[in-house]
Amino acid sequence: MRVLLIVPHIPAGGGKLAPHLGIITLAALTPPDIDVSVVDENLEKINFDEKVDMVGITAMTPTVTRAYEISDSFRQKGVPVVMGGFHPSFMPQEAIQHCDSVVIGEADAIWHNVLRDIESKKLKKFYKQNGFGSLDNMPVPRRDLLRRKSYIMFNTVETSRGCPFQCSYCSVSAFFGNTHRSRPVSDVLREVETLKGILIFFVDDNIVGMPKRAKNLFRALIPYKRKWIGQASLTIARDPELLELAARSGCAGLFIGFESLSQESLEEAGKRINAVRRYAEDIKKIQDHGISIHGAFIFGFDHDDESVFERTVDFVKRHNLDSASFSTLTPFPGTPVYSRLLNENRIVTKDWSRYGGAVFRPKLMSRERLNEGCAWAWKECYSYRSILRRLARPKRLWFIHFLLNMGYKQAIDKYV
């Protein structure tokens, strides 16, 4: 049997940063008697005439429109399609209109069932595993199926799933059932030993979500002398031992969700771990340990007026964040903010291809102004002058930060 796994094109050029770890993990879970291949549409075209027995497609809300197009094309040729990922999991009745089967939630424990049902022509419409399984003994992802040199950060590694916090705009907590599970440190180290190159991108939604476990992981990584980038909450700045161990283990940069400069907006979002009054202190502590910061910000909370754009960009410049990203508050299906805005009749469209911009009615500005302000923030932050200023400060893995900044600039020039 031949199985083709597909990652649909990600809008605004974001697909070249790192490979989709979930897809190559499924490939590793596929029995050796099945021929499996992977196509990342962000890097190569899909051959719709390829002779395969099944197609598997992963989709987020911004990519699901394209995913449905891909699925429809293969089904017209008589090829059965299985879909999974965040959006199909939250909207299975919609997704099943475009595919033969939907995997709801995690697929690890039931992937074999899906494949064997395909072989026996007994494919079910829906699959959902019971509960959330252990992450022990996860296979090493099939990185050999990808084009290594096409990604900025190739070595993606998962050490945990989920997040202990429950922010209203985030799909992660809903998808993982508000759980936060981790892999054994020994398993992570065995995978690290298989990786070529010095840089690792830990894709955990919050690598310091369980501080005691994170300290054990960081201690174990120190002898490997690798450099790594990951995602973390600002709580890392308030635990001196945790921060010190992260730096010693090779942490070169952290993606941190500041989200807003308004404490009222943070309360609205349920992100109570952030304290605006401590931002400057937290940033300094992290940067003093040689760790770069990518700050993430969201516009469009009910407390945001039109001054939010300039104030946020000034904050990024004033605190010399190494890079930043800006987005409009997006009510993704499955999130509390989606339910709230839907109940308030403020969501104006369910055209998922538009879920990269304002798709609801803000309280203190127009949708047009929200989109314009967000675009302005991107352009202002990624002007050549701004990039050169932020990259002037010595930092670990300077070249990676340069590639990230230039990648953002190219995407902005093309899409914004």
Image: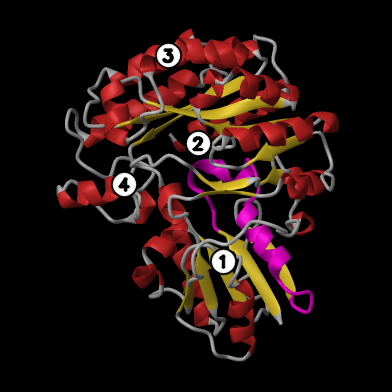
Q: Which residue is mark 3?
A: 278
Residue 414 has which mark?
A: 2
| 258 w.r.t. 331: above or below | above
As helix, strand or loop, the secondary structure at mark 1 comes to: loop
Q: Mark 2 or mark 3, which has the lower sequence index? A: 3
Q: Are marks 3 and 1 in contact (CB under 8 Å)?
A: no
Magenta residue span: 8-34
Q: Mark 3 or mark 1, which has the lower sequence index? A: 1
Q: Mark 4 or mark 1, which has the lower sequence index? A: 1
Residue type pointed to by label 3: Arg
Asked whether residue 348 appears in the rendered view, the answer is no
Q: Are marks 2 and 4 in contact (CB under 8 Å)?
A: no
Instruction: Residue at 60%, 84% (x, y): give it.
Output: 118
Q: Are marks 2 and 3 in contact (CB under 8 Å)?
A: no
Q: Mark 2 or mark 1, which has the lower sequence index? A: 1
Residue type pointed to by label 4: Pro
Q: Nearer the viewer, residue 375 or 288?
A: 288
Q: Which residue is mark 1?
A: 107
As helix, strand or loop, the secondary structure at mark 2 comes to: helix
Q: Are marks 3 and 4 in contact (CB under 8 Å)?
A: no
Residue 331 has which mark?
A: 4
Query: How far is disc 2 from disc 1 in space, using C-alphas?
Result: 35 Å
Query: How far is disc 3 from disc 4 in space, using C-alphas?
Result: 28 Å
As helix, strand or loop, the secondary structure at mark 4 comes to: loop
